[in-house]
Amino acid sequence: MAMDQQKQSPPRSWFTPGVAGIGLASFFSDVGHEVPTALLPSLLSSLGAPAAVLGLIEGLANGASGLARLAGGPIADDPGQRKQVAIGGYASTALLSSLIGIAAASWQVGAFRVAAWTARGLRVPARNALLADIAPADGYGRAYGFERAMDNLGAIVGPALALVLVSLIGVRSAILVSIVPGLFAAAAIFFAVARAPRLTRRTSAPLRIKLAALVRGPLGRLLLAMTVLELGGAAATLLILRATQALTPHLGLQGATQTALGLYIAYNVAATLISFPAGYVSDHRGPVWVVATGALMFAGGYLAFTSGSIAWLAIGFVLAGLAAGALETGQHAAVAAIAPADLRGSAFGLLAAMQSFGGFAASAVAGLLWTIISPAAAFFYLAVCMGLGGLATLVTAALGGRTPEA
């Protein structure tokens, strides 16, 4: 007995070189594409484009990203292709985003932006499926939490780097230089791919999203619950707009804008800090509980935005940031644990598409309610959707089956 116990290998650590590589890829990629994102309004203004053009470009880019995520799912089901798509997606995103710096007209800015976001969308299911290949099953929560934390950290560093670069070399050159962290990201994902296990490539088959297989059983119930809560996942720009408008009468436009941006930084810091602890809880209590907790925190944060006071707005930003970090970590870990291995890419693609289109629908409905009724009505709607989604995920846990739970 003692000899048998001595021969048993120690538990495999979740923090493998491959997990570190994917985390670094997420960090550098976010730094790289946040620079042109932060400078896009200035560049378009210099080209004489009205604000509506920025909205059109971002709408087209996000729509293309959502479609690419959905299409990238079946491709990522093949272990061999998911590696190629991950590497190509990171490299293409870096190149296309930096080329925005040479655009001489607004339509060229839009073309590069849409192309970059398409490449970014294609790589998402491949990266998430690759992370499930690399990390041990009992460490999915921490692995995805680490990846989300690095991604959110990049979202903090990127805009700060943009400010520094603009002061030194100007807007266009800063956008061109953003290819450097993007190429670091491509190198990091190449490093991670080299350490992924060699899995059998699937035989040639038509690429299609196997919706019937994805929506059955525990995975289908979980995706349905996530669909409900994604209808409450509005863009963070709405939070910034709410703070700016509410604080302008007291602080003036410039003061309100600066305060709103400071609160948004706090949002990103909160999301970064919570991601890994959320992953730890996911591994020990189950990812569904983390998803439900994140959704309910979002509901509380949105309710805080129904007030226009600085104190409640600050509470809302912090709660929303904590919720975002927990929710994304829990969602990725849950899908990795529940989805069959041969459908994992499709499952991640469907989740990513739901997040993209759900966010679009949430922002559109909230914007309509904001305009027709009031900002408070918009955030109350978002809170209700998140609350119902959180309760729905708890129901999936109660139903049991293969759903991860405590």
Image (cartoon, rainbow, N blue to C red):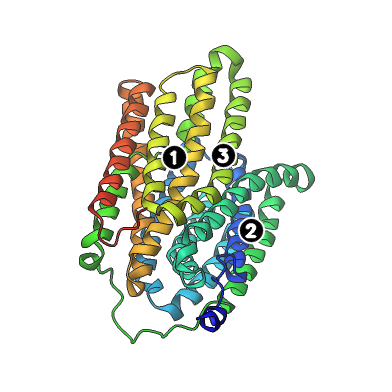
Nearer to the camera, 3 or 363: 3
Going by the numbered disc 3, the residue's amino acid type is Ala
Q: CA distance from mark 3 to mark 2?
A: 19 Å
Going by the numbered disc 1, the residue's amino acid type is Ala
Which of the two labelled residues, at mark 3 and mark 2, occupies the earlier sequence position?
2
Horizontal relation, residue 293 to residue 264: left or right: left
Which of the two labelled residues, at mark 1 and mark 2, occupies the earlier sequence position?
2
Q: Secondary structure at mark 1?
A: loop
Horizontal relation, residue 375 to residue 213: left or right: right
Q: Residues within 10 Å of mark 1 (few under 14, many from 20)?
A: some
Judging by the rendered image, the residue that carries numbered circle 1 is: 235
Judging by the rendered image, the residue that carries numbered circle 2 is: 28
Horizontal relation, residue 237 to residue 366: left or right: right
Q: Identify the residue at horizontal 28%, vertical 44% (top origin).
A: 228
Q: Secondary structure at mark 3?
A: helix
Q: Which residue extends farthest front?
A: 1
User: Which numbered disc, 3 or 2, marks the residue closer to the eye?
Assistant: 3
| Image location of residue 282, percent across then percent down | 45, 53
| Image location of residue 16, percent across then percent down | 59, 69
Q: Identify the residue at horizontal 34%, vertical 33% (top origin).
A: 382
Label disc, if present, on residue 270 of the rendered structure: 3
Which of the two labelled residues, at mark 1 and mark 3, occupies the earlier sequence position?
1
